[in-house]
Amino acid sequence: FFFQAGGGIRDYAVTGVQTCALPIFPRRTAQSMTSSPELQLFSSCPDAIGGQPDEYFRRVLDAARWAEQAGHKAFLIHSGNQLSDPWAVAQMVMHETTRIAPIVTVQPLYSHPYAVAKKVATLAMRYGRAPHLNLAAGAYRADLLSLGDSTPHDKRYARLVEFGTVVQQLLRSADPVVFDGNFYRLHKPAALAPPPAPPTRRPSGRARTELP
């Protein structure tokens, strides 16, 4: 499960549960201290491992429609070497729904932060709502090694924080971004159209470091 507070969503368990309840704590005011927190429900997308492709995509869209009809706010889509591309699944979900927002799991190994920011901006422009981001430092170690990534554990999380910071700057800045980090360097790439609302981003799993 995970919850969203003023500083962003924090994850306190392994992701992938079918439904997540997220109490959202507003800024503390005299009124808010006497009122109950708002409860929001997030759902999790079925994973495709084996089986028939048509059946899998039908299950995904059925789950997304049911979640939206039940009032869920977002739909977590996992990422991994054995899974379907989460961005393709996210676009399917957004095309078949009107309110629910996909939470796309992204990993630095799979995409450059500029590519991720461009996908967010493009989907938001097309559907009028931005997908959220679930930032994952990696997957199973065997999956990482199969793609030539032997980055040590702590450096993967440091890379993840930098990755998320770059994505955030690209989506919030109206001007070309300059960034000089340990893992990523950008020098004024073309500015992106900002989404209608900035996407929520959170580190996945038991990260030792958190995004600012």
Image (tube, rainbow, N blue to C red):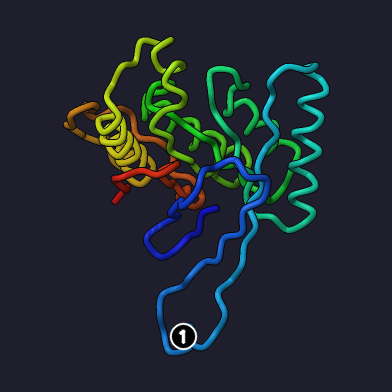
Q: How many marks?
A: 1
Say which residue appears at 67% left-offset and 45% top-offset: 18
Say which residue appears at 79% left-offset and 32% top-offset: 59
* Crowdedness near tag 1: few (<14), some (14–19) or many (≥20) residues, C-alpha within 10 Å: few
User: Toward which corner of the image does residue 161 lie, by quadrant?
Assistant: top left
Q: Secondary structure at mark 1?
A: helix
Task: Say if 119 sits above or below 24 in the image.
Answer: above
**Of the pair 27 and 3, the residue shown nearer to us:** 3
**Of the pair 8 and 198, the residue shown nearer to us:** 8
Q: Position of residue 123 (x, y in %)?
A: 57, 36
Say which residue appears at 36% left-offset and 30% top-offset: 113
Q: Look at label 1 and name its amino acid.
A: Met
**Of the pair 64 and 129, the residue shown nearer to us:** 64
Q: Position of residue 187 (x, y in %)?
A: 21, 27
Q: Position of residue 40 (x, y in %)?
A: 62, 62
User: Toward which corner of the image does residue 53 lie, by quadrant?
Assistant: top right
- 46 left or right, relative to 212: right
Task: Say if 49 sits above or below 104 in the image.
Answer: above
Task: Say if 204 sits above or below 185 in the image.
Answer: below
Residue topped by disc 1: 33
Say which residue appears at 47% left-offset and 47% top-offset: 199
Q: Position of residue 115 (x, y in %)?
A: 42, 26
